[in-house]
Amino acid sequence: MEIRAATVLPARREPIELHTADGLTLVGELALPADRPPLATLVTLHPLPTHGGFMDSHVYKKAANRLPALADLAVLRFNTRGTSSERGTSEGAFDGGEGERYDVAAALEYAEFHDLPKVWVVGWSFGTELALKWAHDPLVEGAILLSPPLHRATDADLDAWAAFGRPLVALVPEFDDYLRPEEARTRFARVPQAEVIGVDGAKHLWVGEPYVRIALNEIVKRVNPDAFPLPTDVP
């Protein structure tokens, strides 16, 4: 069976709640391999909620639908403060990336408390800003950024990540609306351990199954290389 956009592979999928240090309850979902422990974990940070971003943004939904089965990964998705999806609405209100520091911390605390292994943070667009600003946690093995705009994340945030020392991988679409590969290489040069990958033909929203597959493969290549490349068919 070919893996298509709507394919949902077997997994244990659990609704979860995250509790922030400033008193909010956030809604989310944890997807785990169906019959074995995960080998690594993705904590996902979604695009800008004021422009339609939420935990079900399509790359993350497809990651949760596929990667527990194909790569033995746990995939944690959640709505940041004030964001709604089918799962429900997280308490609070959008805070432009500042109050969201508590949301990132709550997700990482959940992963630590539940003994989820080898935590990597995956940010997309606005989520990349949250990762760069607020994911400097000893629990974090590294971060993967999809379409980083580098609007809210400043050179000081890049310098802080450089000092943090963890791997940083930026997947930058050739036709991104905000930051394209050549400029991204210049901006990320401040982070010695950063790897910038230009993705030919891709756009900011990663529309189209070929681009989703590229994104998921690049994630798996770093997080569980033994599962790379991902199959395009399943029995």
Image (spheres, rainbow, N blue to C red):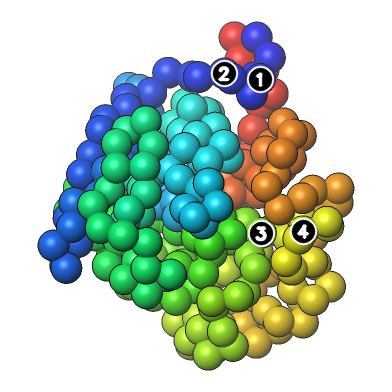
> Which residue matches tag 1?
4
> Which residue matches tag 2?
7
Residue 30 visible in rendering: no
| Quarter occupied by residue 34 | top left
- Between the C-alphas of marks 4 and 3, the distance is 7 Å
Q: Where residue 40 appears, x then y in whole percent?
A: 41, 47
Residue 176's disc number: 4
- The residue lying toward the viewer, choosing from 118 and 60, is 60
Q: Is residue 144 left or right of residue 119?
A: right
Where's the C terminus, which quadrant?
Answer: top right
Where's the N terminus, which quadrant?
Answer: top right
Q: Which of marks 2 and 3 precedes in the sequence? A: 2
Q: Which of marks 3 and 4 precedes in the sequence? A: 3
Tag 1: amino acid: Arg
Q: Is residue 17 left or right of residue 143?
A: left
Tag 3: amino acid: Ser
**Dot 2: what SS?**
loop
Crowding around mark 1 (Cα neighbors within 10 Å: few <14, some 14 to 19, many 20+) is few
Identified at 57% across, 37% down, the residue is 58
**Dot 4: what SS?**
loop
Kindly check if marks 2 and 4 are in contact, taking CB atoms under 8 A apart as contact.
Answer: no
- Between the C-alphas of marks 4 and 1, the distance is 24 Å
Q: Is residue 15 above or below residue 151?
A: above
